[in-house]
Amino acid sequence: MNKRISTLFTFAAVAVLGAALFGSTYTQTQIHGQSLDISKMDVSAIEQIHQMGGLQLVMPEAFADTDCGSLSSSGRKVVEFNLTGESVKLPIMGGKTYNAMTFSGQVPGPTLRVTQGDVVKMTLTIPAGEVTGHGNDMHASQMGASNFESINPGESKTYCYIAQVAGTFKYHCSGVKLIGMDQHVLSGMYGIAIVDPINGYNKLMVEKTAVSNGKVTMDRQFYDPDALEFQLQYNQLYLTPEGNYDAAAMFQHHNTATVVNGMQFGYVPNAVHNTLIKGDANKNIFVAQPWNGLDLKQYQSQLLYVENNQHVRLFIENQGNEPVFFHIVGEILDRVTQGNRVQAAGTETWLIGGSQGAIVDVVFDEPGAYAAVNHDYAAIYTGAATVFVAGDPFGLNPRLVAAGVIPAPVPSYAYALGNPSDAVPPMGMNSIKHPAINVHGLYTDEVASKKIADGAIPLWEVVPTLPKI
């Protein structure tokens, strides 16, 4: 066997071994397609390869710069993202609680929002009293997975990366050296990172028709990039009757509940809406209203309010195991952006797989109540129904003005009641500011108090002081 054939055989053997180790479907034909002429190679290079035991396929120069010191002085904007990892008890539907794992005392964790090209400086701290370690895998990063290693209780870790790609990205606990990652994530340790395009969002084109001189013609309408924004994160809970994580149920895909931003039916009418529309707090106006009472404080369900003919942008992330068939009953999804590219326009439903996100732009033309659902019937009936109210479909403006709740008619009820804080992402370059924000979410009381200090409205305190309508 000559030297060239011997060397080729060695590389073929390495390729076969690599295929076995990494699950590659490399075929013998593909291996034969690889060729190496040793006569054209530097002898010293060949000797180095032998000494290393093989080729070093990725050289250090190929890695992205993730050194916090150099990135901080690189001229890029640095955004600090500080999280804690802690286990707490949080409520679930039916008046029970479950043993949740959280980033910073809330489910989902705080939303990170940056502009493409910014440096993210993420610090995760695990309190000394926490029962287990936690890590943080940020899908918006491009860096070695060793950065996501778990951190022991009483310790903290910082890493930095450049948010190079625009879009929506999941972040989640990586468990303890990957062990228990499913438990940590499906118990609440997940969140969303929004990376805005460096040049901002594009205008929205909506296809409509018009009648001109007795003929139906195309009448495309364009909306400014600025939009009223919401975030919706889908997941499942797998729980025992005692509120502990049930791994056996997860492996069988037998979920206990489907949640949006951590809660089942968290964005449906409550007793206040019953009173406004039906005149009776006990007369429900929706098929499921499990979070009715003011005594539930930040956990009382709230509706999402938008104006008619307003550009609305939805940041959606599927944090769980099951597909999300995103659909808005009574509306068309005017534009869907996924993977940093527009994927569809004028579509009815969009499939979002596990650990995948999408940006949906929509304009609500007519006043009304619209349910955004995961169009999997099991998901709808176990919690994945979110109600948007567009305009003034219930004719409440005259009554609200007469009662002195608002000084003049408003284009959406958000001006009177606000939108729920956990559904509103941080402001970006093309964000329309919400008229008001109320305190709502799967928060600990400490987190809810901070929201109030930051200006969010505690409706459980304000509503009883309002004039009777």
Image (spheres, rainbow, N blue to C red):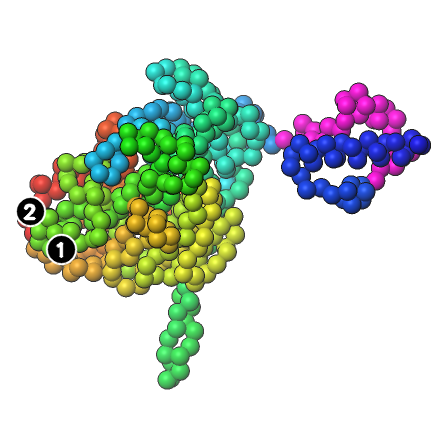
Label 1 and label 2: CA atoms lie apart by 15 Å
Q: What number is the disc on residue 277?
A: 1
Membership of 143 in magenta stretch: no
Residue 121 location in percent, x, y?
Answer: 47, 28
Residue 391 location in percent, x, y?
Answer: 24, 58
- Which residues, given as a range, are shown in magenta? 35-63
Residue drawn at x 86%, y 31% is 7
Give the camera-side residue of 182 and 368.
182
Q: Which structural element holds mark 1?
A: helix
Residue drawn at x 50%, y 55% is 342
Q: Residue furthest right?
A: 2
Q: Is residue 412 above or below residue 293?
A: below
Residue 114 location in percent, x, y?
Answer: 44, 38
The count of marks equals 2
Give the residue type that dot 2 points to. Answer: Pro
Q: Which of the image's four quarters has the N terminus?
A: top right
Q: Quadrant of residue 41?
A: top right
Mark in the foreground, 1 or 2? 1
